[in-house]
Image (cartoon, rainbow, N blue to C red):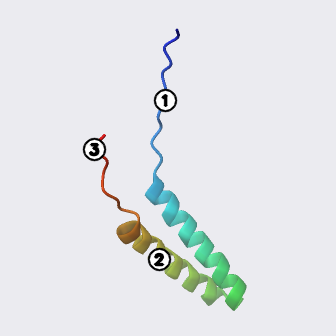
Amino acid sequence: MENQVESNENLNVKGIILLLGTIFGALISIIVKGTFLGFIGGLVIGFALAVFFISVILPHKPSDR
């Protein structure tokens, strides 16, 4: 039987969530408002919601295994 070595690369999940939240917040806002200030507001609100998600909703109890 062969020894299989798995390469586990750690993903920066928090960074990905921040990036996606910011981008999608800006895209939704630019579609709804249609202005540059709406785009900037969407960036800020999307970033704030992503930070809230990471700090409040995402944390979970670490497994004992």
Q: Distance of mark 2 from mark 1, alpha carbons?
A: 33 Å
Q: Distance of mark 1 from mark 3, alpha carbons?
A: 22 Å
**Could you tell me which quadrant the C terminus lies in?**
top left
- Asked whether, in this view, residue 27 is left or right of residue 13, the answer is right
Q: Quadrant of residue 58?
A: bottom left
Name the spot of residue 18 as percent of width and height, x first.
49, 65
Q: Secondary structure at mark 2?
A: helix
Name the spot of residue 9 as percent of width and height, x first.
47, 38
Residue under pointer 1 = 7
Q: Earlier in the sequence, mark 3 or mark 2?
A: 2
Residue under pointer 2 = 49
Q: Secondary structure at mark 1?
A: loop
Residue in the image at 59% along x and 77% along y:
25
Q: Distance of mark 3 from mark 2, alpha carbons?
A: 30 Å
Q: Are marks 3 and 2 in contact (CB under 8 Å)?
A: no
* Category of crowding for the residue at label 2, using alpha-carbon neighbours closer than 10 angstroms: few (below 14), some (14–19), many (at least 20): some
Most extreme residue toward the top, as rendered?
1
Camera-near label (1 vs 3) is 3
Looking at the image, residue 62 lies above or below residue 38: above
Q: Quadrant of residue 41?
A: bottom right
Amino acid under disc 2: Leu
Q: Earlier in the sequence, mark 1 or mark 3?
A: 1
Amino acid under disc 3: Asp
Residue in the image at 40% along x and 69% along y:
57
Amino acid under disc 1: Ser
